[in-house]
Image (cartoon, rainbow, N blue to C red):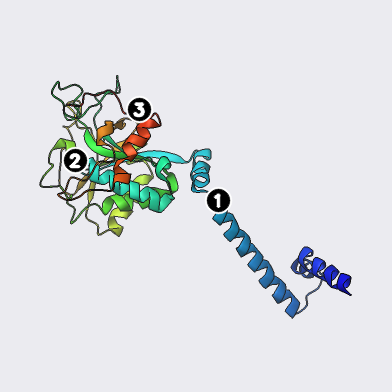
Amino acid sequence: MLSIILLLLLVFFLVDPLEAWNSRPFPFPQPEWQKVALQRRSFLSSATAMLTSAVLPVDSVVASDSDNQNLIDVYFGCGCFWHVQHEFVEAERKILGRNDEQLTSRAAYAGGRLGMKDSKVCYHNVAQISDYGSLGHAEVVSVKIPKENFSDFAVEYCKLFRNGMRPDQWGDRGLEYRNLVGFMGGAGSDLVMQLIEASKATGDQLDFAVGRGGDATAKGGADSDIPRLVWIMDSDVYPAFVAENYHQFHDGFMFGEDYSNAYNSLAQMFAKLGEDFGKCPRV
């Protein structure tokens, strides 16, 4: 008797009664056993999905993006890059589920053409070596993201503004702090409409214009720091240059805007992993 019961149980779990029923050449009313079978298969599928997601590491998900070569390089500028980097690190964690070693947000300089020959762009320094302001660049945060998530990050960018103004609008002013967003193709990219829609979704605070660059070579005059205006840059023409290590994962610019030691220590972690932050002078 026990062997018969075991045999019946084995048949129940190995044979899919749904397929056996659906393969019949003529219609019949759905019997109760088919409903039970449907519930069983649905449960098993759900359980399998739950188990799979439970054991799938985050880096596998990100690696999958890399394997598909679907990551794009973009950058966002909105005043001082310290605060902006922190917000995009949080966005990487929240939207993409990245862990510390997978974070790609970096403080950088972009928006000018000068400095491209030697790839050297530096913060203000006494010797005035490759000074980013003199070269027409602004402070930005570069990040590598899946193209399908661009609109999510565009929303995070637009949320940095209050009534179209940067949090540091009345402190950090000038060409080095102008608002800009850069991606491959610039104004000719399909990402432009996603950026505009992101602005609309967050209060329609911003206007956009085609970036011409922030240096003396810009046709029609250099881009300037205009409240509520974001310059759209072609990152092929105006690439981002990573900033010095001491600017990475820095506390914010506002009084009391101190981040955690774990966040601040990411700069040292990436340096130890061999990331190159250039050879610019410290002072």
Q: Quadrant of residue 18?
A: bottom right
> From this viewpoint, which residue is outermost toward the front?
261
Query: Secondary structure under badge 2?
Result: loop
Label 3 or label 2, whichever comes before in sequence order: 2
User: Dot 3 corresponds to which residue?
Assistant: 276
Mark 2 surroundings: few (<14), some (14-19) or many (≥20) residues within 10 A: many
92 over 274 or under it: above or below: below
User: Dot 1 corresponds to which residue?
Assistant: 56
User: Dot 2 corresponds to which residue?
Assistant: 178
85 over 135 or under it: above or below: below
User: Going by the image, does 158 lie left or right of 98?
Assistant: left
Of residues 68 and 254, the one drawn nearer to the viewer in this rendering: 254
Label 1 or label 2, whichever comes before in sequence order: 1
- CA gap, disc 1 to disc 2? 41 Å
Mark 1 surroundings: few (<14), some (14-19) or many (≥20) residues within 10 A: few
Query: Secondary structure under badge 1?
Result: loop
Q: Amino acid at mark 3?
A: Asp
Of residues 207 and 109, the one drawn nearer to the viewer in this rendering: 109
Q: Measuring from the top left, give residue 204's x and y in whole percent.
A: 24, 57
Q: Amino acid at mark 1?
A: Leu
- CA gap, disc 1 to disc 3? 31 Å
